[in-house]
Every structure is written in C-alpha cells, then in structure tokens.
Amino acid sequence: MSFVLNESQQITMDDRFLNLDERTKKFVLNSWAKDFAEIIFPAINERRFSVLYSDNAASRPNSPVNAIIGSLILKEMFNLTDDELLASILCDVRFQYALHTTSFKNQPFSDRTFSRFRQRLYLYYLETGRDLLHEEMEAMANVFVKYFDINPSVKRMDSIMVSSSCKKMSRLEILYTCVANMVKAVYKTGEYQNLKNMEHYLDEEDRNKTIYHRKNEEISKRLQEIIDDASILIKELGEAYFELPEYQLLQRVLKEQTETTAEGKLTPVGKEKISPDSLQNPSDPDATYRKKAGKDNKGYVGNLVETVDKKGSIITNYDYDVNTHSDSSFCKETIEKLGEQEKEITLIADGAYSSVENIELAAKNNINLITTALIGKVPDVIQSEFELNETTHEVVKCPRGEKPYKTRYYEKSGLYRASFNKKTCEHCPLREKCGAKLQKKSAFVLITAKTIQRASYLKKMSSEEYSILQKKRNGVEGLPSILRRRYHVDTMPVRGLVRSKIWFSFKIGAINAKRVLKMASEQAATLYNKIKFSFAFLKSGKYRAELLLVA
C-alpha cells in the first residue's frame, strides 16, 4: 500500500454537503463538527506517517491518514467502538464534515482500517523505537497553544497509574499458566515424547483442580510440583523452542520466582525477594507491580504536562511507561525534553517529582521547578544558612555566624563534620534546629551540601509567591479522574506497553480536542457579545464609543 496525501479536503461544487437542505446545514455548522473541521483536522500532519507505507506508486493508495487519526480522536471523544465509529462516519454527516470526507463518493474507511493503522504504528515502533503517534499528538498540542495564544510560561505536571486489563494472578497461577502454555505449544508441534506425563496440563479441568480446589496447606506442595515440571520441560526441550514466546516466559518466570539450593534443586524464592518487575500475568508480560498511596497496581503509569493560563489549558507533553518508572525519573526526562528555554518557564509538580538533581537540572535549562513538598527526610529551614567552601571542603560558618575550629570532610559520602566549642553551642537558641550534638568537651554538626540545598528550597517554598504557584497545580489533578471516568483508561482492550500507549495517546488527543472545541465555542460567544454590544452603540448614535470598542 503506497502513501498518498489526502487532496480531497476542500469542498467541491458537487460536494454532498452542498446538496443538503438549509436546516441540516445549519445544524452541522452550529455543532462541534465545524470547529473540529477548521481547527483540529488541519493540525494533523499526515506526512509524518508516510514511513508506514510503501513508496511504490503503483500499489494501492492508502486511506487518508489525517482522516484516520481524526476518526480515532472522535472515537475516544464519544466513547465508541471501532464498529460504532464506522457506523457514525457512514451515517452522520457531522462526522463526515469534521473529517473533510463529504466530497468522497464512498467513505474511505472499512471495518479494518482503524485496527490496521494501529498495527502499523505498533510494528513501526518495534522496528525503530520511534513513536510517531506520540510525536503527532504533542505537535498538534503545540499548534493549539499557538492558535489560542496560550502563554507557554507556566506548566503543571501529574501522573496517573494505569491498570492492565489482565487478570490478577497468584504465584501458583502464574507458574501454572506458563507451564500449561508451554505444554500446549509443544503439543501443537506434535513432539509428544517431550511432554513425559505432563498431558494433564492439556485438560481444561486440571487448572481448576490445581489452583482452586486445593487446601491452603497443599498450595506450597503443588507450587513445588509445578516448578519441578517447569524445570524438566526446560531441560528436555533445550534451545529448540527458544524462539517461542511461551518458552521465553517460562524461563523468565523460573528466574524470577525460584532459587537454586546447594543440591541444585529449584525451590520457590521468598515473597520479599520477588522484584516488582517480575511477570504479573503471561498475557501481559510488560505489566509491572507498584504500590502507591496504599493501593496495589499492576500495569503502567502515564505522566501528563499541561500548559496553562487564563485562556485555557492543553496537554503539551506526556509519557507512558511501566509503573515502576518513578515520578522523579519522569521529571528529569521532561526537563531534558523541554530543553534550554530562551525565556524562563515555571514547571509545577507535587513532591514526588522533587530532588536536588532535578531542581539543578531545571535551573540549568532556565526552568523554575516548583514542587509542593520534598520526598525523603525533610531538613529544617535554618540549615540553609550554613555556609560551605566546597573548594577547600570547609564549613565557613553556622546559621548564627560562628566559625568551627575544625572541619572534617568525607569524600565518599560528601559529609562535613564541623566541630564547635561546647560553650558556643550549649546555650545557642538554634541548637535544636541546626542539628548540633553536644559531647563532653565539644559540639559537632553533620551536614552535606545537598541538605543545605534542600533546606534552601524549603525556605523558598514557604514564601507567598511559591504558595500562589503551588495552588495552580491543583487543576492538573483532575486529569487522572477524567481519564478514568470518561476515557476508561483502566479498561483498555489491549495489553502490552506499546499497544496500550497507542490507545493512551488517542485519549490524550481526545482530551485536547474537547478543550479546543470548548475554547473555540467560548471565543465565538465572546465575539458575538462584542458584535451585539457594538450594534447597540451604533443604534444609539454613539459611533465614537463603538469605534473605540472595535479598535
């Protein structure tokens, strides 16, 4: 299939829309379809996706890429299935007008168009590591920011845990499923001799008998039996089946869930030793485990960055990864992605994004990173007033201005030990806050440069200016709720990191599209009121006032 640009985007003389009655036209032009067609659809850059298709002009041309992407955004906006989306495009002139397809004799979509396009995106990502859809959604967001003249100087950030649609499994279930899948894969090849009394895994009732119809005291015994079966399978099959995903998952689960005894036997590893990155369900190998805010989550995590001002807000940056990816890592990657700014911008986030390294990296890129709290042990703000000489590795003075008589520096840990006269610290009103500890003849303070930096940041956070900026962050906390309630992000009908990210990207595109339509509607209402007000002045003869208003 060759790539061809969509040239049927302008209304022609024989366009279907022109032949509609005036009443229907009025309804279409007063609906969401007009702004979608005029603002959102033209922002889609279909050339970006030319790499998904052949450059052989003799092959069959592709369906219009911008129409496909626009359709999939509408799908998420209206919470439709692929079949419902196709029916809406075929039967609803608003969808056709929004997608610029009213000039087509037949709508350029089939029942497989959308799934095939997602598959192309998926395969291209696996081949190159490049996420075309992610690039496009962020590029479109930047177009919307410029269109509505939203000031890009303030951004706010938050994350959302995304649950995998796979079933929650116990250790016994995970191991049993991996072994059963491998047995079935071997059975399909006809190599029955390799199974060696493992045919019971082919019985549909065996799963229930093994997992659910057992007493608690039998589970440990059965777990060991399944591990023994898995070990035998791996030894018998060797490398002949290595390319099968079932074989690779079986190897992985044995590595994660077992340990080798002195006698060379595989036994279940202690629960506390199982990594959060371990296999959670063979049907979704990418999903990981994380406990956040007291809740267990198996799946992924999305990171969202909004550009916001009084005119509105648009999600201009986002990311998606396994849920063991920390907020602090997302923060670092976001700062690196934004790069060095000509004019200072402010990035507001919660305490989980904070670290001294991130604050320093942001400052280097002319980004003012503001967080609502600091993770880890919180220092006292008075410690910000310690003065260090990092060249000579000395503590110059304490918060009260006293100079230590001796400083010792530990290079590996970056720790300073400053020794003071005991009488100096004994009656000091700041002793409880600065961390000084009294000894028989002296007093000492243990301090690091990072502690001073963290204390300095805390001092800034307590200022009124920072307090106002921190309140602006609260608006972004509504995004996770919207993604769950309206866009059903926790029940996406796909599994795996790459596939679910594609669906997640279209949901981000839909949120931005809805916001664009809302802002366009508000602008139109404001313009209407201005015109109405101007006519009122004209009617009353106050021409100068009307001219000043228009100017």
Image (cartoon, rainbow, N blue to C red):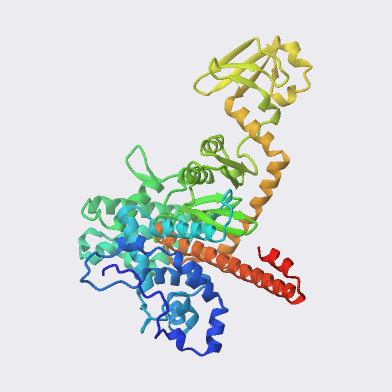
| Res 343 → quadrant | top right
Quadrant location of the N terminus in the rendered image:
bottom left
Residue 215 in sight here: no
| Res 453 → quadrant | top right
Quadrant location of the C terminus in the rendered image:
bottom right
Asked if residue 425 is positioned above or below residue 329 in the image, the reply reads above
Task: Decide which of 190, 266 is in the foreground and name it.
Answer: 190
Q: In the orientation shown, which residue stands out farthest toward the bottom? A: 21
Residue 397 in sight here: yes
Q: Position of residue 443 (x, y in %)?
A: 69, 14
Q: Is residue 33 left or right of residue 206?
A: right
Q: Residue at x 66, y 51 (%)?
A: 472
Asked if residue 540 is positioned above or below residue 396 in the image, the reply reads below
Q: Residue at x 73, y 66 (%)?
A: 544
Q: Is residue 238 left or right of residue 261?
A: left
Q: Position of residue 78 (x, y in %)?
A: 53, 73
Task: Decide which of 497, 519 is in the foreground and name it.
Answer: 519
Q: Position of residue 132 (x, y in %)?
A: 38, 58
Q: Is residue 76 left or right of residue 283?
A: right
Asked if residue 204 is positioned above or below residue 476 in the image, the reply reads below
